[in-house]
Image (cartoon, helix red, strand yellow):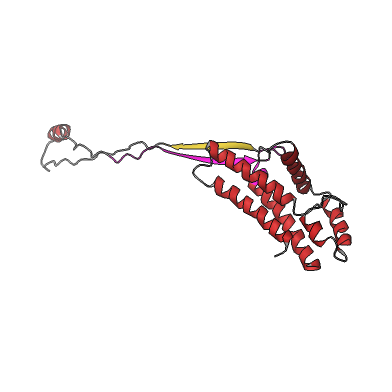
């Protein structure tokens, strides 16, 4: 496995860790919030350091792909072509900016939303009873029999306890549209990682 792909898989590890935390019972706790942000900032650092793209080929401070394949014949030409294609990619620009914030300014803190769902169960009972009326009874006698009939006491219905569930979500609210499903942190990170993986696949196919 190339060093470039190793770095890609390291980034994927932190993306998977974010998913695990979000699906855990502690996702909405203070620890869950802290752990999610830790994994996110680790992902930003590892994913962004796979390649210097979309920036022009650097003279210094190269990232993993450029250090590993930069001296291969034809790599610079391929790299320059990728720069032209990726420079207009808003997701790539966004992650470059987020990584710089995380490294140089402080932890990136996405916007969180905790949804609490409460379900209460109310007891509903139905009562029915039968009255035997002789066929030769008069109307008055029939009404008296009905009035004197006592319905049986209903059995108490089983009572289910109130159920409370929580769902935690995280968003890159600074992206266009704000807190919409397309800007959910894990979804956007997965989209970015897929773009990086495509570059790694092409690079290895040409230069490994």
Q: Is residue 33 left or right of residue 139?
A: right
Counting every numbered tag in the picture gives: 0
Q: Is residue 163 left or right of residue 10?
A: left
Residue 169 highlighted magenta (yes or no): yes
Q: Is residue 117 above or below residue 70?
A: above
Q: Is residue 147 above or below residue 35?
A: above
Residue 176 visible in the current orientation: no
Q: Is residue 35 above or below residue 57?
A: above
Give percent across and percent down for residue 103.
73, 41
Q: Which quadrant would residue 101 be assigned to in this image?
A: top right
| Residue name at image x 75 percent, y 60 percent | 200
Report the magenta residues as a range. 157-185
Toward the viewer: 110 or 88? 110
Give percent across and percent down for residue 66.
81, 57
Q: Is residue 47 left or right of residue 77?
A: left
Quadrant occupied by the C terminus: bottom right
Toward the viewer: 3 or 79? 3
Q: Which quadrant would residue 199 be assigned to in this image?
A: bottom right
Give percent across and percent down for residue 106.
70, 36
Residue 41 highlighted magenta (yes or no): no
| Residue name at image x 62 percent, y 41 percent | 37
Quadrant occupied by the N terminus: bottom right
Give percent across and percent down for residue 24.
51, 46
């Amino acid at each position: 496995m190339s060093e470039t792909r190793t770095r890609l898989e390291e980034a994927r590890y932190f993306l998977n860790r974010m998913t695990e935390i979000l699906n855990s019972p502690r996702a909405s706790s203070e620890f869950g919030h802290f752990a999610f942000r830790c994994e996110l900032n680790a992902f930003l650092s590892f994913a962004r350091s796979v390649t210097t793209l979309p920036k022009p080929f650097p003279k210094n401070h190269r990232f993993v792909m450029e250090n590993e394949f930069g001296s291969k014949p034809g790599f610079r030409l391929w790299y320059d072509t990728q720069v032209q294609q990726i420079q207009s990619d808003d997701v790539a620009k966004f992650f470059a900016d987020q990584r710089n914030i995380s490294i140089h300014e402080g932890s990136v803190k996405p916007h969180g939303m905790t949804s609490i769902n409460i379900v209460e169960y109310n007891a509903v009972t139905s009562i029915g009873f039968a009255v035997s009326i002789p066929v030769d009874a008069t109307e008055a006698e029939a009404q008296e029999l009905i009035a004197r009939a006592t319905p049986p006491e209903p059995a108490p219905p089983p009572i289910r306890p109130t159920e409370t569930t929580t769902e935690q979500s995280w968003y890159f609210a600074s992206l266009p549209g704000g807190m919409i499903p397309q800007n959910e942190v894990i979804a956007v990170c997965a989209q970015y990682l897929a773009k990086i993986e495509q570059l790694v696949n092409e690079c290895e196919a040409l230069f490994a």
